Amino acid sequence: MSENIEIRTIISNRNINQVSDSPVTDPAAGAKGLEGSNAFVCQRSKLETKTSALKKSSRYRSRSLSASSTDSYSSGSSSDEDDVSPREKVQTNSAGTSDFCVRNITQHAFGRREIEIAEQEMPGIMALRKRAADDKPLKNAKIVGCTHINAQTAVLIETLAALGANVRWAACNIYSTQNEVAAALAEAGFSVFAWRGETEEDFWWCIDKCVNAESWQPNMILDDGGDATHLMLKKYPVMFKMIKGIVEESVTGVHRLYQLSKGGKLTVPAMNVNDSVTKTKYDNLYSCRESIIDSLKRSTDVMFGGKQVVICGYGEVGKGCSQALKGFGCVVYVTEIDPICGLQASMDGYRVVKLNEVIRNVDIVITATGNKNVVMREHMDKMKNGCIVCNMGHSNTEIDINSLRTPDLTWEKVRSQVDHVIWPDGKRIILLAEGRLVNLSCSSLPSFVVSITSATQALALIELFNAPPGRYKSDVYLLPKKMDEYVASLHLPTFDAHLTELTDEQAKYMGLNKAGPFKPNYYRY
């Protein structure tokens, strides 16, 4: 795809009849999944106990915040200490509209400044916005978005709108929303339903408000974890069949899509951008390599030199975390189930162990598997005093948090997203973000890397929305290699990088098109 790529213009406008579905049971209550299938079993309902319930417990005590915690990223502008639920407030933006629900609309100016800062560090998505704005390749697209809501996501949302889309957005994580950014989006006229510290009921209510709105028939889904897809499929099945395509960016969500496809329950095309090279390498490896350090430092002020760390999982996220912590002088252990990943870890200089072999001695435990029940109560019972426990995988199921909510243990809130869990003998572990994504809950992601992911998501939406009938069937597809390479090319000018061009003779010898793609789909970068 040449640098002056022409973004695919929309195909003929189609008249979509308004579809009305009568809601069925709340997906959060559906423990048996969809029509008996395990495809979209909602694990949040059992594992995300409301913080408010903890505060009422006699075994929970709150410490007064130190100056450092008051100034921390998590507890400043994105405070979740307001006792009044946003659902109980009546708020309007400057235009007089109220089709949104955020913590405090008056924070919009602060949020707008954060968005402007992010734009400076997101050259790829901004370049895509500039190149495709005239063509409006997403004209008539009505997108339901369910992702983390932060300054970087706001740049993506405003880019999609600039390309012609009409969007409604909710958060995929109850603790990663930047309240001031959500306020800025609401002030700009976007229907955003999200705030930091939502309850589980709030979480599903927000997604439902995005899906089911008056004079609104969504035709695209951009998902992170599969929750919007799950809700629409379970609660609004007729509406779901009108969807032209789903774009999913997480391991968990992609796994669920493949389960749906295998069970014959995926009735629309879906694009797996999680396994695109630009997502896997950059968002998972390079981003996590930086954000794990940032999140641990901001939340615990820990000194890394000489600390013993065990990282559960040596995929791209585990690789990035391992590299960063090793670089700071940590002794790093890795747990793995895959012999290939285990051999990679060994060749990279890490000890591959079973968790029980090192759990008594390590200072930091990080999960990065995307699985469930990786760190159990039996492991936490054996941990040393002061051990830090956190999760870098998308799902909050990796650490068995429910096993810690027992009468014999005391929870002590230190600062936002930081809890001491205290055993009867006085031993305590430091639990971050209650087992949710620590880098998005306790810090932030590098905007440049998010620019790569956002550009990938935007191109996937454009591809699915404009694809002629029959190109994509009701299955899960990888992002075309050509688009992966185009996303990378959008970001090379930032580094003043100049690619070598193949001669005609070289291209013929290699059997390649001079403009790419340059690698086969099976190539492993």
Image (tube, rainbow, N blue to C red):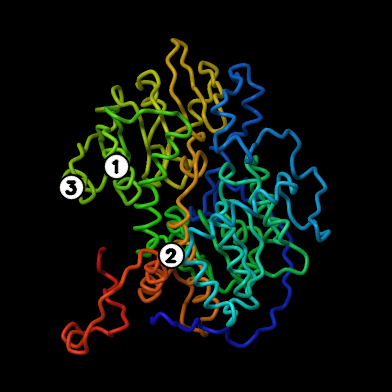
Query: Residue drawn at (23%, 82%), measured in percent from left and top?
Result: 502
Q: Give the quadrant of the N terminus.
A: bottom left
Q: In which quarter of the image is the C terminus?
A: bottom left
Q: Callout 2 environment at 10 Å: few (<14), some (14 to 19), or many (20+)? A: many
Q: Position of residue 117 (x, y in %)?
A: 55, 54
Return the residue at label 2.
272
Q: Mark on residue 343?
A: 3
Nearer the observer, 124 or 414: 124
| Callout 2: SS | strand
10 Å neighbourhood of mark 3: few (<14), some, or many (≥20)?
A: some
Q: Which residue is drawn at 27% across and 27% down?
A: 306
Task: For marks 3 and 1, give the CA distance.
Answer: 14 Å
Question: Given the image, on which type of amino acid does mark 3 rest?
Answer: Leu
Q: Residue 110 carries which label?
A: none
Q: Locate residue 173, reporting x and y percent.
A: 56, 46
Choose the circle earlier in sequence order: 3 or 2: 2
Residue 489, relative to residue 345: is it above or below? below
Check disc 1 and report the residue beneath it: 322
Q: Nearer the viewer, residue 466 or 108?
A: 108
Q: Is residue 337 left or right of residue 97?
A: left
Kind of residue sitting beneath label 2: Asn
The residue closer to the viewer here, 78 or 50, is 78
**SS under mark 3:** helix
| In front: label 3 or label 1 | 1
Q: Who comes first in sequence, dot 3 or dot 1?
A: 1
Which mark is in front, 2 or 1?
1
Q: Which amino acid does label 1 sit on?
A: Ser
